[in-house]
Every structure is written in structure tokens, then in C-alpha cells.
Image (spheres, rainbow, N blue to C red):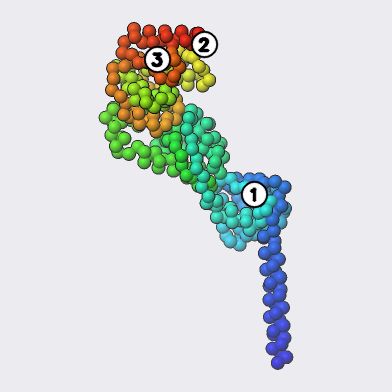
Amino acid sequence: MKYIKVGIIVIISLLVITGGIGYYLYHKITTPNNCKETYTLYIDENTTLETVCNKLSENSNENTAYWVEKIFEIKKRKVNRYHGFYKITSQMSAWNIYNLLALGDNSTSTITFNNIRTKRELANAICKNLNMPADSLYNAICDNDVCKSYGFDTVSIVTMFLPDSYNIYKVSSVKNFLDRMKKEYNSYWNEARLNIAKDNGMTPYEITILASIVEEETKKTDEMATVAGLYINRLKIDMPLQSDPTVKFATGDFSLRRILNKHLEIESPYNTYKYKGLPPGPIRIPSKVAIEKTLNYQLSKYIYMCAKEDFSGYHNFATTLREHNNNAAKYRRELNRLKIK
């Protein structure tokens, strides 16, 4: 009987000790880290547990970093499995931080991008609502090997991005995001559109370049097909496109309101006054609407166009140089009257 009582006491003691240890551990891993202000951790393929814990130690109490490290080691999970930015708040415990980093942020964000001219603008617009640094995406689409892996080069890669709204996981690697964009690109350029482009004697890339010029020439969707048809007429007769927006692109000054004779002398393959045919790349990332209007351009005999003198955004079209010169004269008179330089 005596031994039974001793055994019971030992068991109870062990339970008390175990419970105490368990409570101690629970308290340690669930205590808020009490950082002074919210900060971010960036995780990529090169991130190590040590670098994460150092960052935690710098911004939170040391106990938080210690317990995050121990949990990762015990659970045998990788800290760099899910890439992206992670916000750490003062109320998050070591356990909360572990779950966030080990399991990733499964929330999604809707990204919308349009009216984009440069790669830098593209990267900034896309990463604005994603846990992804804009520099990482920008560097990727400037890397020849990365671009080549998707079937493009560093100039044509921008055509893989079709302006629209996309639902994307907030925590996503650059590669996963580019994979998604390539999937969207392949879906858009289906057999039907590829055949239309082929029937027009053009590739999807050439259609996209022309669409970028069309969209820079007019924001009026109801005349985009006419503008596209005019430029295709010029291409067919080996006439220079003589597109002012391509010259503006060549200058790099997108604030220009008026293209002057001095701008037409700029040495650049994008200067379509000097060089025949399409420029080597798009001068903006065209919308799907502009691409559709270019694919299904309007048949006409127009080879000249000039902005209307009422500044409505529409154009006067002409089949003869004489008619065009009259339209251009009217437009210049209004520019001079309003002192637009």
C-alpha cells in the first residue's frame, strides 16, 4: 500500500512538472513580441532561418527570435518555402510568426495594370498590391536568360503582360507570377487569334507592336480599327509609318505635347519617320481592346491621318496628300492660336 501511495505521488509530481513545463513553453511561444512598430520580413530562396531570427532580434524581443528558431527546428520546416513580404505586428507571438512563415499567406489580392509604357512602371504597378519587391520583378524581366525561358527577349517580354485584373496570391515568387502571366498570354493567343494574325501576314508580336502605336495615337476605341487599317495600308506599300508617338518614345520624354521637326531627326530605330516598317518593340503595353481592334482592322484606302482641330481626340483621315495637308494646316493653326508648343 505504501508503494502504491509513493507511485501515485511520483506520477502526480511528474504530471505537475510536465504541466508546468508545458505551461512555461506555451507562455513563451504565445507571448506577443511587443515590437515598437509594425515591420516587414522579406523571404526569398536565399533567406535562411538565421537571417530571419536576426531580423526578429533587431525589431522584437530576443525571446521571440529564439522560440521561432526552436519551433522551426522541432517542426523541421523550411523558412524560405513561401516567398514574399510578411508584416510582423506587435501582437504576434513566436507561434503566430512561425505559422505565417511556414504556411505562407494564402490570402489573395486583385492586381490591375494598364496605361503602362516602361518596364519600371510595369513592375511598380504589379507589385503595389503583392508581397513582392518591384526590383525583383524588374530585374527578372531585364534578365535575358529569364526572358528566354518564357520564349521572349528583354524587349519583347513586356508583350507577355496583358493589361487586365488578375486575382493573385499575395505571397508569390517572381517565377510563379511570371508563370501565371505566361499562362494568361497563351490563353489569350488562342488558335483563332493566331490564325487572324497569320491571315494578316503578321505575328502576335507584330500585332502587339502595332496595337501599341494605335493606342498611343487614339484613346477613342471606335476609331482604333481605322487607325490600325491606315498603318497596315502604309506597311503594304512600304511607306514609313511616320507615327509621332514612336518619335516621342524615342525621345524618352512622354510629356511632349507637340512633335517638332528637330524631334524627327532623332537617331533611333523607333523613329518611324527615318525607318520604314514597325519599330523593334512596342511603345507601350497595349490593352486587349487595342490588340483586338488591330487584329480586326478596318479596310480602307486611308494612308494619312491628323488630329482634329477641335481637340476632341478624334482624327481626320485622308487618302491623298493634298487632303491631308489641308487637315494638318487646320490643326496647326489651332495649336498656334492656343500657344501649344
Q: Is residue 239 above or below residue 298?
A: above
Q: Which residue is mark 2?
A: 338
Q: Picture quarter containing residue 133?
A: top right
Query: Which residue occupies 44% across, 43% down?
Result: 180
Kindly identify the residue that appears in the image at 39 percent across and 27 percent down. Answer: 221
Residue 218 located left or right of residue 202: right
Mark nearer the N terminus (2 vs 3): 3
Q: Is the Cβ of the residue at disc 2 closer than 8 Å to that at disc 3? A: no
Which quadrant would the N terminus be assigned to in this image? Answer: bottom right
Q: Is residue 269 above or below residue 337?
A: below
| Circle number at residue 306 | 3
Callout 3: few (<14), some (14-19), or many (20+) C-alpha neighbours within 10 Å?
Answer: some
x then y, percent, for residue 83: 54, 47
Residue at the extreme left? 199
Residues at badges 3 and 1 in contact (C-beta under 8 Å)? no
Mark 1 to mark 2: distance in Å? 55 Å
Disc with the residue nearer the chain's start (3 vs 1): 1
Q: Position of residue 98 (x, y in %)?
A: 61, 56
Quick one: 147 or 196, which is closer to the camera?
196
Mark 1 lies on a secondary structure that is: strand
Rendered view: 105 above or below 320? below
Question: Dot 3 lies on which element?
Answer: strand
- Tell which residue pokes out farthest to the bottom in this image: 1
Which amino acid lies under the numbered mark 3 shown in the image of this protein? Answer: Cys
In this figure, which residue is indicated by the disc labeled 1? 88
Q: Amino acid at mark 2?
A: Leu
The residue located at (33%, 19%) in the rendering is 230
Query: Which of the two discs, 1 and 2, labels the residue nearer the N terminus?
Result: 1
Q: CA distance from mark 3 to mark 1?
A: 56 Å
Say which amino acid is labelled 1: Ile
Picture coordinates of residue 149, whole percent (x, y): 42, 39
Question: Where does the image place residue 335, in percent across and percent down from the top left?
Answer: 48, 11
